[in-house]
Amino acid sequence: MREVSCIRKSCFRPARPDGACCLLWAGLLLSFSVLAPVVCCGADASEAPVSKPATNSTAETVTSPPQASAAIPAHYAGRVRLDYEYRSQGGQQDEDLFGYWSASGRDLQNGRVDFYLSGRMHSDLDGSTRSEGTFRSLDDAGGVIENRLQQAYLEAHDRPGDLRLRVGRQYLDVADYMQVDGVQAILFENGRLGGRVFGGVPVSYYSSVAGDYYGGVSLVGRPWSGNRTRLTFSQYADDSLGTYDNSYFLDVRQQITDGVWSRGRASVLNDEFRMGSVDVTCFSPSAETSYYAGASRWGAATARTGVYSPLYELLGEQEPYTHFYARMSYAICPTLMISPGASCQLVDRNRADYSNRDYRDYDLTLTYEPNRLFSSSLSAQYWDLESGENFLGLSGEVRFRRSKSWEIGAGCSYASYTYSSYSDISYSFSGGGVEITEDGTVTRETPYSLTYFLRAKWHATKYLILRMQCDIEEDKEASDLSIRGRASAEVKF
């Protein structure tokens, strides 16, 4: 639904004059020289003096004083959020502290400069080193302390927002959300034809990327009514390996009618098909019913660097597969809504492994909201995997709220997973010795768990928000309860 909102608000705005098309090509080649005079200029063309005609033939021409443009006020915002997380299971526990912060300024220098900063910190509080156990990950290692500067950029732009130059640490949303320390010039993207150029040094928190480079170019246009098409080329150059990845990405959005939108995407990596997808979103005129359906296809493109295949060493090569999905939401009455959905994955090869398997997933959610103070939901989900394995989940939740002051929710869920445990080698004892046979054994197992959860949110003041959540899981296979709790305090200014 978020993409639909984007289509409504920005993708189908009336095109700007065709003169922007000619300026695009100069902008792509000379983006810095184009942006500098526009940003630094203190007056727009509309601020030029205007001559008033004489009221009679003998009167002198009177020139009015320059009309000063309305000043645009600057806007500043920021937030700091601190999260404490506790987990315990099977006699082991883990405590962590997370911090998130951001600060932004818009329309500085009379509407021509913006900035944005954001970061994340994490600290392991229990201080124990684990080589094995329940909680095993990079974040769960004893004594871990990390600080990440996620974004830090300055953006200069003209008053209409047609020309933008962004410098610093940023995410490239048109190029696989790559994070770089670099430059991005955005030109006439809200017009009939526009684009951007970008480049910089990739950011990595785990390994050195010294000498690596990532850059590319993107063109976006509206060739006909209701259409928005973007074509992006990017290249990642790995200095340590002496190789590079070339990526091509096509994104086409089309408004078919007032209530029907479609989107198609395709990606090619190193001249090999990487992925393609198409989906359609529909709304009834009364907005009581909505539909969403689509399909995607993932190929076996070969990456030359670790950026486009970060899990290759763990999961091996990606096997080609096809994915289908659909969802409907229907308002039975103003207070009751039902939402069924389904998806399936089909892997090409005959024997799929644990990292890429065939499955079918069905879910159904019923939501009851008689007023703004109370709401409840009941959900069911069923996964049918290959080899007769399956998963069943049931959950229910009720939520109370009072305006924007506070809200509290509670519920429980049931989960059951049926699978086959297979042993390649079987053991037998005969006469005090051990005999090993090649015949394996298959054991059918169906563990289940019950989870109870509680969530609360309180706007203590205009600038302070407190949150709390707790989950208690009772597993059939475990003798101890699994407990997870998180408490957070967020300050906005």
Image (cartoon, rainbow, N blue to C red):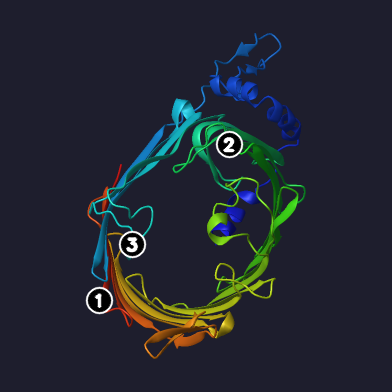
Q: Which residue is mark 3?
A: 132
Q: Label 3, label 1: how many angstroms apart (C-alpha)? A: 18 Å
* First in sequence: mark 2 vs mark 3: 3
The quarter of the image holding the N terminus is bottom right
- For disc 3, the neighbor class at 10 Å (few under 14, some 14 to 19, many from 20) is few
- For disc 1, the neighbor class at 10 Å (few under 14, some 14 to 19, many from 20) is some
Q: Nearer the viewer, residue 34 or 241?
A: 241
Q: Which residue is mark 1?
A: 480
Q: Position of residue 81 (x, y in %)?
A: 30, 48
Q: Is residue 384 left or right of residue 93?
A: right
Can you say whether 438 is above or below 288 in the image?
below
Q: Nearer the viewer, residue 230 or 481?
A: 481
In the image, what residue type sits under mark 2?
Ser
Q: Position of residue 292 (x, y in %)?
A: 61, 69
In the image, what residue type sits under mark 3?
Glu
Q: Position of residue 70 (x, y in %)?
A: 48, 28
The secondary structure type at the circle numbered 3 is loop
Instruction: Kindly check if marks 2 and 3 are in contact, taking CB atoms under 8 A apart as contact.
Output: no
Q: Which residue is mark 2?
A: 240
Tell me where residue 185 sits by quadrant: top right
Q: Is residue 243 left or right of residue 130?
A: right
In the image, what residue type sits under mark 1?
Asp
Q: Label 1, label 2: how many angstroms apart (C-alpha)? A: 48 Å
Q: Residue 44: give its label.
A: none
Q: Label 2, label 3: how many angstroms apart (C-alpha)? A: 33 Å
